[in-house]
Image (tube, helix red, strand yellow):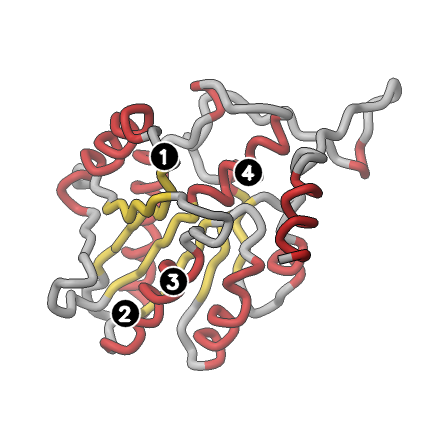
């Protein structure tokens, strides 16, 4: 197999239409939240996704799609992320590492609760579709719920759609017969160690702690927004 850096391509919105592609969009804020909920805190190095493993997985998927269609299909991969005020120096090494692997990065300042990247991800998917080059889409998001509508639209047109996430959070995708669901931990080599996951169906005899998905303080910000 060719080196990931040499084979995974990306295209900026300002570029001309690229070749037919299998598009991966990675929702970093949502995946970080889902991973933090599983771990009960910020992930250590052992529990941070390895993007070289993601790249190799995508290359294999693009090859499979090319075989199905009988022509070359290029993988395109972009990580979408927010940058908190004053946080550029902390995030910069991670962004540079992603770009070195072969991923594009769309970075957006986190100026308010509405400054998320969901709409930018959807816009990118729609642009590739409008260009007529989209031959498959993969959305990496802990729950993927915000992408349900567009994925169902694409599937109805015969464009295969996959959600990468965590089965604890993406029950809609797991149960959807038309959308493929891949648990992030199922991708070979993506984590150095198994995630400490707890299943309600297979609890240990002495019980298990289930961490909250968000802090209680989030209720205050939601209340403030509703009063505005």
The numbered dot on residue 85 is 1
- Label number found at residue 221: none
Could you tell me residue 217's position as x and y percent? 68, 35
Query: Nearer the viewer's eye, disc 3 or disc 4?
Result: 4
Q: Give percent across and percent down for residue 138.
A: 41, 57
State the SS at label 4: helix
Q: Which residue is mark 3?
A: 137
In the figure, is residue 142 to the left or right of 218? left
Sooner in the amino-acid sequence: mark 4 or mark 1? 4
- What's the distance in space between the residues labelled 3 and 1, CA to CA? 31 Å
Is mark 4 in CB contact (under 8 Å) with mark 2? no
Measure how far apart labels 3 and 4 are at the Cα level: 22 Å
- Alpha-carbon distance for marks 2 and 3? 10 Å
- Looking at the image, tell me whether mark 2 or mark 3 is earlier in sequence order: 2
- Count neighbours of disc 3 (C-alpha within 10 A) and say few if under 14, some if 14 to 19, many if 20 or more: many
Determine whether 94 is above or below 31 in the image.
above
Residue 77 position in % (x across, y down)? 29, 50
Residue at (35%, 66%) from the top-left corner? 123
Residue with the mark numbered 2:
128
Is tag 4's residue or tag 2's residue first in the polypeptide sequence?
4
Disc 1 residue crowd, few under 14, some 14–19, many 20+, Cα 10 Å? few
Which numbered disc, 3 or 4, marks the residue that appears first in the sequence? Answer: 4
Pick whichever of labels 2 and 1 is earlier in the sequence.
1
- Corner quadrant of residue 200: top right
Residue 93 found in image quarter: top left
- The dot on residue 33 is 4
């Amino acid at each position: 197999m060719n080196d990931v850096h040499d084979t995974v391509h990306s295209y900026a919105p300002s570029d001309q239409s690229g070749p037919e592609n299998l598009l991966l969009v990675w929702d970093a804020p949502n995946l970080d939240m889902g991973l933090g909920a599983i771990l009960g805190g910020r992930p250590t190095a052992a529990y941070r996704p390895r993007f070289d493993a993601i790249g190799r997985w995508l290359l294999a998927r693009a090859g499979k799609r090319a075989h199905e269609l009988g022509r070359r299909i290029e993988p395109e991969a972009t990580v979408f992320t927010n940058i908190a005020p004053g946080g550029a120096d902390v995030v910069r090494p991670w962004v540079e590492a992603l770009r070195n692997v072969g991923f594009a990065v769309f970075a957006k300042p986190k100026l308010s609760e509405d400054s998320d990247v969901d709409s930018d991800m959807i816009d990118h998917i729609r642009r590739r579709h409008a260009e007529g080059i989209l031959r498959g889409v993969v959305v990496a998001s802990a729950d993927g719920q915000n992408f349900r509508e567009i994925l169902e639209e694409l599937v109805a047109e015969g464009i295969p759609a996959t959600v990468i996430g965590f089965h604890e959070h993406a029950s809609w995708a797991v149960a959807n017969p038309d959308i493929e669901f891949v648990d992030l931990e199922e991708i070979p080599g993506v984590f150095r160690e198994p995630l400490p996951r707890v299943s309600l169906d297979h609890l240990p005899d002495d019980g298990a702690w289930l961490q909250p998905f968000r802090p209680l303080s989030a209720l205050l910000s939601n209340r403030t927004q509703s009063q505005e």
